[in-house]
Structure formats: structure tokens, C-alpha cells
Image (cartoon, rainbow, N blue to C red):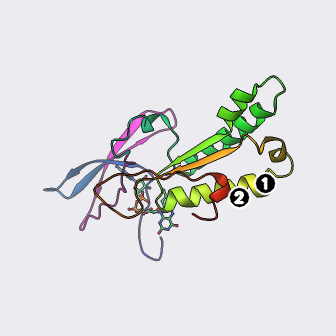
Amino acid sequence: MTRARAHFFEASAEEIDMSNKLVLVSQPDQNGVPQKFYVPYDKLVISVGSNTNTHGVDGLEHVHFLKSIADARNIRNHIMDNFELACLPTTTDEQRRNLLSFVVAGGGPTGVEFASELADMMEEDLTPYVLTSFSAVLKMTLVSSSIKRSSVCSYRSVSISHIEYI
Ligand SMILES: Cc1cc2nc3c(=O)[nH]c(=O)nc-3n(C[C@H](O)[C@H](O)[C@H](O)COP(=O)(O)OP(=O)(O)OC[C@H]3O[C@@H](n4cnc5c(N)ncnc54)[C@H](O)[C@@H]3O)c2cc1C
């Protein structure tokens, strides 16, 4: 940063004043009160990424998304919570089946990578400590629209036993 003679602000860009070449930036202070200031520019590069897209699939707004590190941590904690609940002697077989059924929606690079990471976690981290007792109820499904792009939308489900095939 020093060598490039650059400045770094961890803050949110809220508005661009093109005519005066200023970006209005906001960042909460120690008390959580937003503090706003202008940052001048000569050339402006906008690279704010993209929003997660559910592609109109109903219900996906209720599931875990996988975009940020916080998302990844939440998913991991949720999976571990489910295994811990499944271990309880008071949990019924039906509840156990629900707790240990994992569905990955989206068979793009992230979905497939996540599915294989989940399989690794189950096979390498949780075996033989807890998994062996649950292998009958454990289920993982990868749901994806057709691999080859076509106008007809088809779904392909793959269980954990076929994870290598993916
Ligand atoms: C789980 C996962 C795994 C991936 N794995 C790979 C991989 O292995 N290989 C690969 O090539 N790609 C991978 N990708 C894709 C890759 O991460 C993205 O394509 C890439 O990060 C996009 O870069 P970006 O700079 O456009 O956006 P981002 O990385 O999203 O960066 C945008 C930044 O802008 C900030 N921002 C947004 N709005 C504002 C605002 N108003 N003011 C200030 N800042 C703002 C955001 O906080 C963020 O830091 C993966 C993505 C995911 C989700």
C-alpha cells in the first residue's frame, strides 16, 4: 500500500458524485453510528461483486448460502449441531434421518466442491467416531439443473454412495 501510495478504507460506498468525482462512503464508528465522508478520485473502478441468485427457485431463501467465510462457518456449525442432536438417545430414527439428510442445491463448481468436501468430512473427520452408527440414515443429495444446458430443466440426484461419480 505504501509503495503504491494507496490508501485503504474498510467502508461502504453509498453514492457516486460523478460531476465532482467523489464517492460518498460510510462506516459505523465505535458506537455504531454511521460516519460519512467523501473520497475523491481521478479514475473510478467499481468492483462490488454480485448478489447470490436463487434463480427463482422457491424456498431457497430459507437455506444456507455459500458465499462468504461466515456462511461457510454457519454451515459447518449447523452440520455439527445436527450430528450432535442425532447422537442423543432421545432422538427418534425419523428425526435422525431428517437431521442427517443433506441437500446441496446447485451443481456448479461451488455445489460440487461443497458436496465433495461434505463427503470428505463425513468419511475422514467423522468416521469412525460417530458416522458408523449413522451410516444407514445418512443421505446426501446434489440437486442440479441439467448438466448440459437445454431448454428442458431436469434434476439429477446423487446419493453419497455415488459421490465419486460426480
Ligand atoms: C464458495 C465459493 C468458492 C469459489 N471458488 C472459486 C475458485 O476456486 N476459483 C475461482 O476462480 N473462483 C472461485 N469463486 C468465485 C470467485 O470468488 C468470484 O468469482 C470472485 O470473488 C469475484 O470477485 P469480485 O471482485 O468480482 O467480487 P467479490 O470477491 O465478491 O468482491 C466484491 C467486494 O466488494 C465489496 N463491496 C460490495 N459492495 C460494496 C460497497 N457498496 N462498498 C464497498 N465495498 C463493497 C464486498 O464486500 C466484497 O469484498 C468461488 C466463489 C464462491 C462463493
- Tell me whether circle 1 and circle 2 mark residues in contact (CB < 8 Å): yes
Relative horizontal placement of residue 49, taking residue 87 as reference (left or right): left
Labelled disc at residue 125: 1
Residue under numbered circle 2:
120
**Label 2 lies in ligand 1 vicinity (Cβ under 8 Å):** no
Disc 1 under 8 Å from ligand 1? The reply is: no
Q: Residue at x 77, y 25 (%)?
A: 91
Residue 125 counted in the magenta span = no
Please provide the residue range marked out in magenta: 25-53
Label 2: which secondary element: helix
Residue 165: image location, x then y, percent: 60, 65
67 relative position to 21: left or right? right
List x then y, in percent, for residue 99. 67, 34
Q: Alpha-carbon distance for marks 1 and 2?
A: 7 Å
Q: Toward which corner of the image does residue 8 lie, by quadrant? A: bottom left
**Quick one: label 1 or label 2, which is nearer the N terminus?**
2
For the residue marked with disc 1, what is the amino acid?
A: Asp
Identified at 72% across, 54% down, the residue is: 121
Q: Residue at x 38, y 64 (%)?
A: 148
Q: Which mark is residue 152?
A: none
Residue at the extreme left of the image, as rendered:
19
How crowded is the residue under tag 2: few (<14 C-alpha within 10 Å), some, or many (20+)? some
Q: Position of residue 70 (x, y in %)?
A: 57, 46
Location of the C terminus by quadrant is bottom right
The foreground one among 158 and 4 is 158
Q: Amino acid at mark 2?
A: Asp
Q: Residue furthest top?
A: 90
Secondary structure of residue under mark 1: helix
Query: Between 111 and 32, which is closer to the camera in this rendering?
Result: 111
Question: Which of the four quarters of the rendered structure image does ligand 1 lie in?
Answer: bottom left
Q: Is residue 45 above or below residue 134?
A: below
